[in-house]
């Protein structure tokens, strides 16, 4: 339900779609990201990233896929974050797209938007020939971080930051599930939520 101070829901949604089409939410998020890195004493543009994916229930999505492992119909979020956990890139696909195939889709976008990223950290599911060929072609160095065989929960170097951002995302009720029919709207919602987090942090360092 919208506040009474807003206009008709179609007007509000129309403006949201227009701003998302112009990548305004992503631009605001990325500017806040660079400011936050500078406040932390880092270079504005990152040099390393961690990639991972998360399957999320998407009951109304136009494009969904069947996740054979979880036996549910879902959408998958492929993300890249810097080494402190700030999101650099997001791509959404049906869940039947493998992690390595999804990663290949965002590598070109990372290279264009964050040209200084050279080093990528990933888990064993990304150790695939096609992905490694593409990372070599785009001049990335990939470091695969594997579990040591210990049963139960294990904190892995570099990998924990991406798991933390997944936890932060689900604190937003709108992101607990993917309620959007359109992929571009869902992606804009992610940048809107995470951009708001960065804005609050930058306003109160």
Image (spheres, helix red, strand yellow):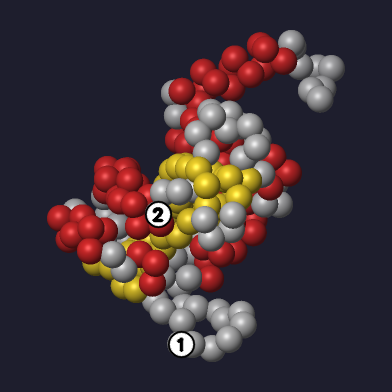
Q: Which residue is mark 2?
A: 98
In the picture, the quarter occupied by the N terminus is: top right
Looking at the image, residue 202 lies above or below residue 154: above
Q: Is residue 137 visible?
A: yes
Residue 181 sits in quarter: top right
In the picture, the quarter occupied by the C terminus is: bottom right
Looking at the image, residue 193 lies above or below residue 71: above
Where is residue 136 drawn, in percent x and y? 17, 61
Q: Which numbered tag is attached to residue 117?
A: none
Using a 10 Å C-alpha cutoff, classify the residue at mark 1 as few (fewer than 14 neighbours), some (14 to 19) or many (20 or more): few
Instruction: State the residue in front, 150 or 162.
Output: 150
175 relative position to 23: left or right? right
Instruction: State the residue in front, 159 or 130.
Output: 130
Q: Is residue 201 visible?
A: no
Task: Determine whether the residue tagged by mark 2 lies in a helix, strand or loop.
Answer: loop
What residue is drawn where x is 31% and y is 72%? Answer: 143
Instruction: State the residue in front, 3 or 97.
Output: 97
Among numbered discs 2 and 1, the one appearing first in the sequence: 2
Residues at marks 2 and 1 touching, judged by CB atoms closer than 8 Å: no
Using a 10 Å C-alpha cutoff, classify the residue at mark 2 as few (fewer than 14 neighbours), some (14 to 19) or many (20 or more): some
Q: Which residue is mark 1?
A: 148
185 relative position to 10: left or right? left
92 relative position to 47: left or right? right
What residue is drawn where x is 45% and y is 72%? Answer: 158
Task: Determine whether the residue tagged by mark 1 lies in a helix, strand or loop.
Answer: loop
Where is residue 33 drawn, in percent x and y? 48, 49
Where is residue 67 drawn, in percent x and y? 52, 52
């Amino acid at each position: 339900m919208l506040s009474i101070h807003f206009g008709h829901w179609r007007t509000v949604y129309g403006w949201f779609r227009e701003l998302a089409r112009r990548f305004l939410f992503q631009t605001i998020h990325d500017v806040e990201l660079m400011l936050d890195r500078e406040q932390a004493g880092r270079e504005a543009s990152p040099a390393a990233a961690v990639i991972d994916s998360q399957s999320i229930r998407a009951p109304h999505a136009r494009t969904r896929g069947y996740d054979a492992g979880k036996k549910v119909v879902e959408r998958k979020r492929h993300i890249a974050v810097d080494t402190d956990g700030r999101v650099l890139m997001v791509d959404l696909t049906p869940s039947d797209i493998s992690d390595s195939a999804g990663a290949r889709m965002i590598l070109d976008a990372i290279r264009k938007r964050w040209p200084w990223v050279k080093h990528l950290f990933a888990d064993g599911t990304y150790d695939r020939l096609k992905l490694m060929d593409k990372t070599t072609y785009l001049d990335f160095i990939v470091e695969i971080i594997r579990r040591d065989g210990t049963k139960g929960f294990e904190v892995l170097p570099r990998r924990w930051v991406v798991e933390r951002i997944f936890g932060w995302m689900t604190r937003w009720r709108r992101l607990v599930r993917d309620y959007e029919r359109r992929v571009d709207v869902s992606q804009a919602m992610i940048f809107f939520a995470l951009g708001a987090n960065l804005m609050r942090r930058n306003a109160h360092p």
